Image (spheres, grey):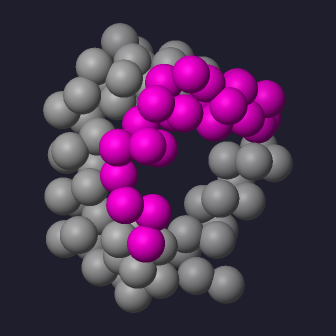
Amino acid sequence: MNDFEKLRGELLNGKNADAVRSAAQSDELKRLAGQFDERELKRAVAEGDTKAMQSLLSRVLATPDGRALAERLRGALGGKP
C-alpha cells in the first residue's frame, strides 16, 4: 500500500470521515473538477511526482473555490482557521 492509499483510507474511515465525504461532494469541488486535467492528477499521483502535485495544489488554492474547499477541510479536520 502506498502513502496515498493509506491517507485515503484514513480520511475516508477516520473520525472525520463524514466531514471529508461532505467536502468531497461539495459544490466547490464539483466546480474545481472541471478546471483541471484528471489525467494529469492521476499521473502525478501514480508516479509519486510531488513537484507536479504541488503545482496542481497551488493552482487549486489560487482559485476562490479551492480556498473555500481548503477551509472546509481544515475545519472538518479540526484545524485552526
The answer to whether residue 74 of the structure is visible from this angle is no
Is residue 78 on the magenta stretch?
no
Query: Is there any visible trace of residue 68 in the rendered image?
Result: yes
Foreground: 19 or 42? 42
User: Looking at the image, is 63 positioned above or below residue 60?
Assistant: above
The reply, left or right, for residue 18 in relation to residue 5 is right
Q: Residue at x 68, y 31 (%)?
A: 25
Give the dominant element type of the magenta stretch: helix, strand or loop: helix
| Horizontal side of residue 57 vs 17, given as left or right | left
Q: Which quadrant would residue 7 be assigned to in this image?
A: bottom right
The boundaries of the magenta stretch are: 15-39
Quarter of the view holding residue 55: bottom left
Most extreme residue toward the front is 34
Residue toward you, 52 or 30? 30
Q: Position of residue 71 (x, y in %)?
A: 41, 19
Q: For residue 21: magenta?
A: yes
- Counting from the top left corner in percent of width and height, residue 46 is at 47, 83
Nearer-the-camera pick, 24 or 5: 24
Q: Position of residue 48 (x, y in %)?
A: 38, 81
Residue positioned most to the top: 81
Question: On the picture, is 31 further left or further right than 56?
Answer: right
**Quadrant in which the N terminus appears:** bottom right
Left or right, residue 4 beside residue 65: right
- Residue in the image at 63% along x and 36% along y: 24
Say if 58 sits above or below 50 in the image: above
Residue at 39% over, 87% down: 47
Screen quadrant of the C terminus: top left
